[in-house]
Image: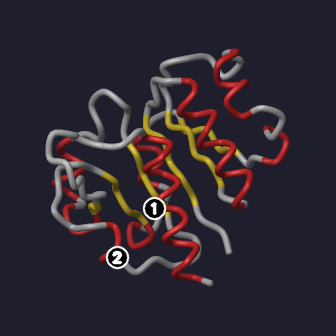
Protein backbone atom coordinates (compact mmCIF):
# COMPACT_ATOMS: atom_id res chain seq x y z
CA UNK A 1 0.00 0.00 0.00
CA UNK A 2 1.46 3.34 -0.97
CA UNK A 3 0.22 6.91 -0.86
CA UNK A 4 1.62 10.34 -1.69
CA UNK A 5 1.73 13.54 0.34
CA UNK A 6 2.30 16.72 -1.64
CA UNK A 7 3.45 19.94 0.01
CA UNK A 8 3.00 22.94 -2.25
CA UNK A 9 5.52 25.64 -1.37
CA UNK A 10 5.84 24.70 2.30
CA UNK A 11 7.15 27.48 4.54
CA UNK A 12 7.80 25.99 7.98
CA UNK A 13 10.69 23.51 8.24
CA UNK A 14 9.43 21.60 11.31
CA UNK A 15 6.12 20.86 9.57
CA UNK A 16 7.93 19.42 6.56
CA UNK A 17 10.29 17.49 8.81
CA UNK A 18 7.40 15.97 10.77
CA UNK A 19 5.59 15.06 7.56
CA UNK A 20 8.77 13.51 6.19
CA UNK A 21 8.97 11.34 9.30
CA UNK A 22 5.30 10.38 8.82
CA UNK A 23 6.05 9.46 5.20
CA UNK A 24 9.01 7.33 6.22
CA UNK A 25 6.94 5.47 8.82
CA UNK A 26 4.17 4.69 6.33
CA UNK A 27 6.15 4.15 3.10
CA UNK A 28 4.45 7.23 1.68
CA UNK A 29 6.18 9.30 -1.00
CA UNK A 30 6.72 12.96 -0.12
CA UNK A 31 6.45 15.42 -3.01
CA UNK A 32 7.92 18.89 -2.43
CA UNK A 33 6.70 21.55 -4.83
CA UNK A 34 9.09 24.50 -5.14
CA UNK A 35 9.75 27.20 -4.27
CA UNK A 36 10.29 26.09 -0.68
CA UNK A 37 10.31 28.62 2.14
CA UNK A 38 13.54 27.12 3.49
CA UNK A 39 16.60 25.18 2.42
CA UNK A 40 16.43 21.42 2.63
CA UNK A 41 19.54 21.41 4.81
CA UNK A 42 17.76 23.57 7.42
CA UNK A 43 18.62 22.34 10.94
CA UNK A 44 14.95 22.54 12.06
CA UNK A 45 13.88 20.43 9.09
CA UNK A 46 16.52 17.80 9.81
CA UNK A 47 15.78 17.78 13.54
CA UNK A 48 12.04 17.24 12.99
CA UNK A 49 12.81 14.21 10.83
CA UNK A 50 15.48 13.05 13.29
CA UNK A 51 17.39 10.12 11.89
CA UNK A 52 14.68 8.88 9.53
CA UNK A 53 15.59 10.78 6.36
CA UNK A 54 17.16 7.74 4.68
CA UNK A 55 13.76 6.02 4.79
CA UNK A 56 11.85 8.82 3.05
CA UNK A 57 11.29 8.86 -0.70
CA UNK A 58 11.21 12.53 -1.75
CA UNK A 59 10.38 13.86 -5.20
CA UNK A 60 11.02 17.53 -5.98
CA UNK A 61 8.92 19.47 -8.47
CA UNK A 62 9.92 22.84 -9.95
CA UNK A 63 6.40 24.23 -9.62
CA UNK A 64 2.78 23.25 -9.04
CA UNK A 65 1.81 23.25 -12.73
CA UNK A 66 4.59 20.76 -13.49
CA UNK A 67 3.34 18.51 -10.71
CA UNK A 68 -0.34 18.71 -11.78
CA UNK A 69 0.43 18.01 -15.45
CA UNK A 70 2.24 14.80 -14.52
CA UNK A 71 -0.65 13.32 -12.50
CA UNK A 72 -3.87 11.39 -13.04
CA UNK A 73 -6.36 13.86 -11.59
CA UNK A 74 -8.63 11.05 -10.34
CA UNK A 75 -5.90 10.25 -7.77
CA UNK A 76 -5.68 13.82 -6.41
CA UNK A 77 -7.26 15.11 -3.20
CA UNK A 78 -6.83 18.73 -2.15
CA UNK A 79 -6.97 19.58 1.55
CA UNK A 80 -8.46 22.96 2.35
CA UNK A 81 -10.54 24.83 4.92
CA UNK A 82 -12.60 26.20 2.01
CA UNK A 83 -14.92 23.27 1.43
CA UNK A 84 -17.62 21.46 3.38
CA UNK A 85 -16.73 17.95 2.17
CA UNK A 86 -15.20 16.03 5.07
CA UNK A 87 -12.17 13.82 4.51
CA UNK A 88 -14.18 10.92 5.94
CA UNK A 89 -16.63 11.17 3.02
CA UNK A 90 -13.94 10.32 0.46
CA UNK A 91 -13.09 6.84 -0.76
CA UNK A 92 -9.33 6.50 -0.90
CA UNK A 93 -7.33 4.05 -2.99
CA UNK A 94 -3.70 3.05 -2.94
CA UNK A 95 -1.62 5.56 -4.89
CA UNK A 96 -3.77 8.58 -4.06
CA UNK A 97 -2.17 11.99 -3.57
CA UNK A 98 -3.02 14.26 -0.62
CA UNK A 99 -2.15 17.83 -1.57
CA UNK A 100 -1.55 20.58 0.99
CA UNK A 101 -0.89 24.26 0.33
CA UNK A 102 1.52 26.59 2.08
CA UNK A 103 0.85 27.17 5.75
CA UNK A 104 -0.04 30.87 5.46
CA UNK A 105 -2.21 30.81 2.31
CA UNK A 106 -3.29 27.27 1.55
CA UNK A 107 -3.78 26.19 -2.05
CA UNK A 108 -4.40 28.67 -4.88
CA UNK A 109 -8.06 29.65 -5.31
CA UNK A 110 -8.06 28.80 -9.03
CA UNK A 111 -6.87 25.26 -8.25
CA UNK A 112 -9.56 24.83 -5.60
CA UNK A 113 -12.22 25.97 -8.10
CA UNK A 114 -10.88 23.69 -10.84
CA UNK A 115 -10.82 20.65 -8.54
CA UNK A 116 -13.80 21.58 -6.38
CA UNK A 117 -15.09 17.99 -6.41
CA UNK A 118 -11.69 16.73 -5.14
CA UNK A 119 -11.43 19.12 -2.17
CA UNK A 120 -11.62 17.82 1.40
CA UNK A 121 -11.49 19.32 4.87
CA UNK A 122 -11.11 18.33 8.48
CA UNK A 123 -14.09 19.76 10.37
CA UNK A 124 -13.30 21.97 13.35
CA UNK A 125 -15.61 21.33 16.27
CA UNK A 126 -14.61 24.61 17.88
CA UNK A 127 -15.45 27.15 15.17
CA UNK A 128 -13.00 29.64 16.74
CA UNK A 129 -10.16 27.47 15.43
CA UNK A 130 -9.60 27.76 11.67
CA UNK A 131 -7.52 24.63 11.15
CA UNK A 132 -5.09 22.15 12.61
CA UNK A 133 -1.34 22.17 12.13
CA UNK A 134 -0.28 20.99 8.66
CA UNK A 135 1.62 17.94 9.93
CA UNK A 136 -1.27 16.86 12.16
CA UNK A 137 -3.74 17.20 9.30
CA UNK A 138 -1.50 15.18 6.98
CA UNK A 139 -1.27 12.40 9.59
CA UNK A 140 -5.02 12.25 10.16
CA UNK A 141 -5.86 12.06 6.45
CA UNK A 142 -3.09 9.61 5.64
CA UNK A 143 -4.06 7.20 8.40
CA UNK A 144 -7.71 7.35 7.32
CA UNK A 145 -6.59 6.34 3.82
CA UNK A 146 -4.48 3.52 5.24
CA UNK A 147 -7.42 2.36 7.36
CA UNK A 148 -9.72 2.31 4.33
CA UNK A 149 -7.26 0.29 2.25
CA UNK A 150 -6.30 -2.34 4.83
In screen coordinates, is 6 left or right of 118? right
Residue at figure coordinates x 62%, y 17% from the top left:
39
The picture places residue 38, in percent across and down from the top left corner, at 55, 17
Looking at the rendered image, the quarter that the C terminus falls into is: bottom right
Q: Earlier in the sequence, mark 2 or mark 1?
A: 2
Find residue 86 and report its image quarter.
Answer: bottom left
Residue at figure coordinates x 62%, y 48% from the top left:
30
Crowd tier of the residue under label 1, counting other residues whose Cα lies within 10 Å: few below 14, some 14–19, many 20 or above: many
Count of number-bearing discs: 2
> Which residue has dot 2 on it?
90
The picture places residue 107, in percent across and down from the top left corner, at 29, 41
Above or below — where is 125 with respect to 44?
below
Above or below — where is 150 with respect to 52?
below
Above or below — where is 66 with respect to 94?
above
Residue at figure coordinates x 49%, y 24% from the top left:
12
> Which residue has dot 1 on it?
141
Where disc 1 sits, the SS reads helix
Looking at the rendered image, the quarter that the N terminus falls into is: bottom right
Find residue 19 and report its image quarter.
Answer: top right
Crowd tier of the residue under label 2, counting other residues whose Cα lies within 10 Å: few below 14, some 14–19, many 20 or above: some
In screen coordinates, is 108 left or right of 45? left
Above or below — where is 29 with respect to 60?
below
Q: Tell which of 137 and 5 is nearer to you.
A: 137
Amino acid sequence: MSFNIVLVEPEIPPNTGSIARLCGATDTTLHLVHPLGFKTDDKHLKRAGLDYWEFVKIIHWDNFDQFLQAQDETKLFFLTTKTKTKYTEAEFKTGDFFIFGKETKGLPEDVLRLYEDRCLTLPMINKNIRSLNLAMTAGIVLYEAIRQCE
